[in-house]
Image (spheres, rainbow, N blue to C red):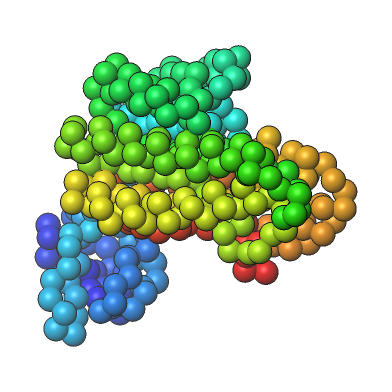
Amino acid sequence: MMAFCPESQKRLSDTPGVVIGQPAACTPIRAMSLPWSPLCPPLPLAAEYTCQATLVHAGGHGYGPRVTVTPAMFDLSGRVALVTGGNSGIGLGMAKGLHEAGATVIIWGTNVDRNASAAEEIGARAHAMRVDVGDEQAVVDATARVVNEHGRLDSCFANAGMEAGRKSLLDTGLDEFRRVTRVNQDGAFVTMREACRHMKVLGNGGSIVATSSLTVLFGQAGGYGYTSSKHALVGMVQAIAVEMARYRIRANALLPGWTESGVTAEAFANEKFVANVMPRMPVRRWGTGDDFAGIAVYLASDASTFHTGDSILIDGGYAAF
């Protein structure tokens, strides 16, 4: 692949992906990775230019799209993002990132005081609502209110969830099982359904993101309601991605690894647990909510318009070790 500057018409590279000259008409902004495709192998770093150099595929593959990876692609100004469970942990980290990128952010949570504190921490364009996602009508009404008050809904992060404890299979009754799936599975389903309903009508497309878990990759004794619900979210987003693509609505799941939150607080306070798990963390630390700010901005932005139906692992390398 060779890059040409449409302003200067000078070839920027003889070697695929390697810039050997800087035309006078082009000003480098930052290093970037050119996208991979089945027709072209992964490329090393090239330079991004303000002229947005046109990519020309060598080898008879035709002409590729114009390179448009600029900071503006990640600008969420004027957009509205909804984050359930946005008053702490991963949800709060995502909400802060979205706000920093320019979005108006609405967070849902059941703790009024924590909601207010989180909204203040996030910033001036943050708004908090008390919503129990396990209550279907409450979700229907709250989603409609978001759209009525803000005029749009561009991204929805179905992040609210709860831990199930570690009861064994034989000790887990349906009441305990459903106590967890009511929020983690049913609540996420209704939230994503209502967000898609309004996105379809609004006609602006949108992004649906569900917070699943690293547990979908490994067997885990106990916590059957939690594990089942997190598996269910992966299937849901794949179905949404297929069905709603015609409306320019994309859907993806996040698979967080061990991250500091109310859900993991008890485990992280257990010395035996820490001694067993931390050695498997290549980064040698737990994740924090702020580690999810970047992925939230990416998935809410125009940078991810071709990214849908995926499960994105963010675990500090745990699964690779």
In this picture, residue 271 sits left or right of residue 231: right
Q: Quadrant of the N terminus?
A: bottom left
Seen in the picture, residue 76 relative to 140 is either above or below; the reply is below
Residue 64: tell me if it is visible: yes
Q: Position of residue 268 (x, y in %)?
A: 78, 44
**Could you tell whether 25 is left or right of 290 in the image?**
left
* Residue drawn at x 25%, y 79% as measured from the top left: 39
Q: Quadrant of residue 22?
A: bottom left
Q: Residue at x 40, y 51 (%)?
A: 236
Up the image or down, 268 lies above or below 214; here it is: above
* Horizontal relation, residue 78 to residue 299: left or right: left
- Name the residue at the bottom extreme: 59
Quick one: 33 or 120, which is closer to the camera? 120
Q: Residue furthest right?
A: 271
Q: Position of residue 171 (x, y in %)?
A: 76, 49
**Residue sitting at 30 percent across and 23 percent down?**
144
Q: Quadrant of the C terminus?
A: bottom right
Depth check: 201 or 96 in front?
A: 201
Asked whether 221 or 23 is in front, the reply is: 221
Q: How far across and down, in percent of the image, does residue 93 sit? A: 54, 36
Q: Residue at x 73, y 43 (%)?
A: 165
Q: Is 12 situated above or below 275?
A: below
The answer to whether 237 appears left or right of 113 in the picture is left
Whether 101 is drawn above or below 143: the answer is below
